[in-house]
Image (cartoon, grey):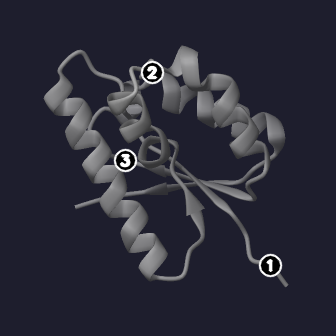
Amino acid sequence: MIGELVYLASPYSHPDPVIKEQRYRDALKVLADLTKSGVVAYSPIVHSHPMARDHDLAGDWKFWDQIDRVFLSRCSKMIVVKLGGWDVSIGVRDEITIALNFGIPIQYMEVK
């Protein structure tokens, strides 16, 4: 039997590129830790940040909304990573709304 696929929601967009890069690195660490523990997870930030950065793609929620919606629709759970700015992130807020509309359970994760 194939296990569940978890969608990892975390903040990303910010006018300061240094903060944006740190948010990517923070999401990467969380994803690596989850992977080590046997969780199969998809992080739109980890997946898209290098592509957006290196190939001049938009890095905002408006651009990635439809793409992330497709991935989220295939997941059986969402983990919201409570990194700095998660509670004011438009993308995280919309991802939570989408998950609720799909009936996907949401777990909140504190990070140190």
Question: Residue shown at 25%/31% (left/top)?
Answer: 20
Mark 2 or 1, closer to the camera = 2
Question: Residue shown at 62%/36% (left/top)?
Answer: 96
Q: Please, what is the three-letter code of the amino acid marked with disc 2?
A: Leu
- Image x and y of residue 63, in percent: 56, 17
The residue identified by callout 1 is 2
The residue identified by callout 3 is 82
Element type at mark 2: loop
Q: Say which label, 2 or 1, has the lower sequence index.
A: 1
Which numbered tag is attached to residue 57?
2
Q: Residue furthest left?
A: 18
Q: CA distance from mark 3 to mark 2?
A: 25 Å
Residue 6 image-quadrant placement: bottom right
- Quadrant housing the C terminus: bottom left
Q: Residues within 10 Å of mark 1 (few under 14, many from 20)?
A: few
45 or 11, nearer to the observer: 45
Q: Say which label, 3 or 1, has the lower sequence index.
A: 1
Q: Residues within 10 Å of mark 2 (few under 14, many from 20)?
A: some
